[in-house]
Structure formats: C-alpha cells, structure tokens
Amino acid sequence: MATIFESYNNCKKELSKAGIEDYVFEAKQIIKHITGYNNAQILQKYTQSLTEFQENNLTVIIKQRQIRYPLQYILGKWNFFGREFFVGPGVLIPRSDTETLMDVCLEVIKDKQTPAVLDLCAGSGCIGITIKGEKADSDVILVEKFDEALSYAEKNAKHNKLQVNIVKGDVLEGACSEGKYDLIVSNPPYITDEDMKTLQPEVKFEPETALGGGEDGLVFYRAITEKYKNSLKENGTLAFEVGVNQSDRVKELLLAAGFKNISTRKDLNGIERVVFGTV
C-alpha cells in the first residue's frame, strides 16, 4: 500500500496530466477527504500507508476528476464565507467571486435593525443563509424554482443551524414580490447563449438552469429590476452579482428603472462583479 505522501504525489501528477490547473490545491483536498485528516495531521502521518478502501476511493476520485467531474460534487460539500455548504448535481457550486456580493450585502444591512432580505435564485442557499449567519436579527427569505436546489438549500440551512424561510417560486414571475424588503439580492443565471457553448468542462456538469441567462445573459436582470423594484422599502437596495463585462449593461438597466446611488464592486481578480443601487 502506498503512503499518504506517495499517494499525494501520485494524485498531483494524475491531476496535472488531466489538465487541471489547480492540481496542487485539489490533491491536498482529496487526500484530506479520503483520510479524514487535517493539514497538520497529514504532515505528522505522511509515512502512514493508506488502507485498501482509501486507495480504492482515491482511484475512483482521480478517475472522476480526469473526466472533469467537479471536485465540489465529488467531495459533496464546499466552503463559502467560512461556512460549509452541501452541493451536488442539480445545484450551482458556491464560488469565491460571490463573496464580493456578500461583502456588499453585509455593508448594506449592518446598521439596520431586523432587516428584511430577499434572496432570489437562491440555489444552494449560500447567500441567504450566510446573511442570516452574519446578521442574526435579519429576516431572510430564499426563493428557488427547482426541487434539486431547494433540497440543498433546506439541508444547508439545517446544517448551519440557521432559520431562514425557503420558498419554491419562479423569479421570472415575481415570486415573493408582494413583500417589502431592505435588501433584495440575486446571483442569477447570467451566461449568454453563445458562452454556454464554450464552458469549462467542469461547469458543464452544473445545471444549465442555474447558468444560462438567455441570448444576452440579461434575462433575469431585466425581470428582477422590473418585477421587484416596488418590493423595496424606501432606501432599500437591489444587489446583483454579474458576469465579466456585464456591469455597464446592468447599471444601465437600474438607471432606466429609476434606481439611485448605483455602484459597482470589483472581485479579487479586479473584475466588476457586483452592481447595486437604491430606490
């Protein structure tokens, strides 16, 4: 049987050969997953041999990654904003880009007492659940159309021991728009029809319904701006995550709808990732 150290090196080599960019990071995550050890324990026990079960598990995971099945789906959970979220087929994987949106949301509501928050196209629930975790007195509603994603949102709220309201509904039809909110937030599907054809191999395993935003990628931004503007309280904020090179067009949509104080926020890669404005 190979040692932990040998297995880690082999895993790195196989992932690199498969063209996986972040193969060093991924190999570490995989070894931690199959051994159940943290970084410090791995360093202490790197000469320990894997069990037969662990070796078999490692072989299966490497094969899954070689066909570019997402690591997050293989591990079954992923970290977002310091919390753990279950993910799997049928739900969008939380990404670090979205932490920029979280920063904006928390700034918007930090001085508000019991802010009412609506999270549209909620998916795994990572945005709404994190808001509740960071701002305990917030009253958060999550809206999601698809059953697979809804089940993950429910599971994640329970796993993080946070009380949020999860509603099955279609954002394009104005689900939950009859309320009044201090903050409406959405990371909607925003990939254009053209770009859907050239997605990374891993992304093709994620649900198309959570990715495709129509011909120009703006279908959900138009609908949300139109259908939910009157659902904001006075000085309430609408905050969107946007795709690369979409910020100007989303700003124009907000401006045309009469929003004020329209701003953008860049992510860690310098991409304008968030557009937000007030009524």
Image (cartoon, helix red, strand yellow):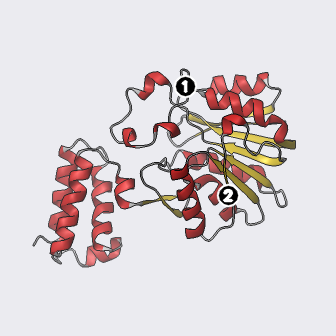
Report the residue that reaches farthest toward the right. Answer: 234
Q: Marks 2 and 1, how far apart in space?
A: 28 Å
Residue 273: % across, % down: 58, 37
Packing grade of label 1 (10 A; few <14, some 14-19, many >=20) is some
Q: Secondary structure at mark 2?
A: helix
- How many other residues sit within 10 Å of disc 2, few (<14), some (14-19) or many (≥20)? many
Q: Residue at x 11, y 70 (%)?
A: 2
User: What's the residue at 64%, 24% (across, down)?
Assistant: 248
> Which of the image's four quarters has the C terminus?
top right
The answer to which image quadrant residue 170 occupies is top right
Q: Is residue 256 above or below residue 46?
A: above
* Mark earlier in primary sequence (2, 1): 2
Amino acid at dot 2: Ile
* The N terminus: image quadrant: bottom left
Is 219 situated above or below 98?
above
Indicate whether 240 appears above or below 223.
Answer: below
Q: Badge 1 is on which residue?
A: 214
Image coords of residue 183 (percent x, y) = 77, 47
Q: Is residue 116 left or right of residue 192?
A: right
Q: Which residue is mark 2?
A: 131
Where residue 232 appears, as percent x and y from the top left, is 83, 42
Q: In the displayed structure, would residue 81 be above or below residue 261?
A: below
Which amino acid lies under the numbered mark 1 shown in the image of this protein?
A: Gly
Mark linked to residue 87? none
User: 195 or 8, which lies in front?
Assistant: 195
User: Residue at point 27% right, 65% down?
Assistant: 31
Residue 171 location, quadrant: top right
